[in-house]
Image (cartoon, rainbow, N blue to C red):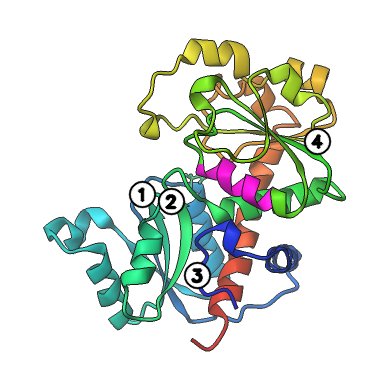
Amino acid sequence: MIKNLVKILNLTPKEINEIIDDAKEFKSDIKSSKVMGKMTALMFFENSTRTKISFEIAAKKLGMEVINFNEKISSINKGETIRDTLENLYFMGISSVIIRTAEDNLIDNLIDSINYPMKFINAGSGKASHPTQALLDYFTMTEHLEEIEGKKVVIVGDIEHSRVAKSNINLLKKFAANITICAPEYFKPKEDLEVTYTPILKEALEDAKVIMGLRIQKERIEEYYDEKEYINNYRLDTKIIEKYAPEAIIMHPGPVNREIEMTSELIDSEKGQTILEQVQNGVFVRMAILNKMLGGES
Ligand code: CP
């Protein structure tokens, strides 16, 4: 059983495939809930639309009770620590939390410091990790490609500040995808992610089967970057996709900054529909995760 879901690196390929298979069954309406009546809390310390609402829908479809923790009107604003807050929630009957943090390692620190068997699901931590996004992205890829092994997956944009890129890379490596990242020097990751890197978009796109755009993470950027230069050299549009990677599916975790990371023409085209498929699949993947993690005795 998966105790906590903090990073993709902690999942085996077998566990990932089980989550994807369960998500497929939830999507086909042939799997039933093991978590009916259980309670979970959403604790989001950063903004969210897709992740927060899809987790809430997933939990409700499974017959769970969902508590929406609102930091702004909580006693954290009176000086209570997150650790104390969580321990209080545990004693009210909440034994799992779905948590988004601005810090990279806060969830690991909370798991280490809490004295009670609370389960944690990472809904996005700083620029480090967004495991459920990578799982729903992988699910979406499997619906379009027979096999991911050896297929060229290109991730374009603000790799350095993107938790989505890092979790996707960690997942796709487990399935031997051929990963290329494409970014200007200022968005190139500082750590070596052990994938192919090129700053030239046309070179990156050639033979790609999956092209994933990323949101420019303005809230995390401290260095200089040039938006006009980015648009000129890295914005994805219909013409460049048609020319260099006509077979590729187009993905983006959202929210998209229209006309910066991708043109509206591309987003609103038939190819751009995959971005909304990702959002739809997020509900089923999150149902699979909640059912798998919280469906046992503890
Ligand atoms: N993809 C993603 O994490 O979107 P939200 O920030 O809207 O949850």
Q: Is residue 37 magenta?
A: no
Q: Marks 1 and 2: CB-CB under 8 Å? A: yes
Question: As displayed, is residue 86 above or below residue 284?
Answer: below
Among the two numbered marks 3 and 4 on one chain, the one whose residue lies closer to the N terminus: 3
Among the two numbered marks 1 and 2 on one chain, the one whose residue lies closer to the N terminus: 1
Q: Which residue is mark 2?
A: 125
Q: Residue furthest left?
A: 78
Q: Please state if 133 lies on the left or on the right of 298 as rendered.
A: right
Residue shown at the point (62%, 37%) measured from the top left: 252
Q: Quadrant of the N terminus?
A: bottom right
10 Å neighbourhood of mark 1: few (<14), some, or many (≥20)? Answer: some
Among the two numbered marks 4 and 2 on one chain, the one whose residue lies closer to the N terminus: 2
Among the two numbered marks 3 and 1 on one chain, the one whose residue lies closer to the N terminus: 3
Question: As displayed, is residue 295 above or below residue 129?
Answer: below
Q: Which residues are magenta?
A: 163-172
Q: Which residue is mark 3?
A: 4
Label 4 – label 2 distance at C-alpha: 28 Å
What amino acid is found at the position of numbered circle 1 in the picture?
Glu
Q: Residue 37: in sight, yes or no?
A: yes
Residue shown at the point (67%, 65%) measured from the top left: 12
Residue 103: numbered disc: 1
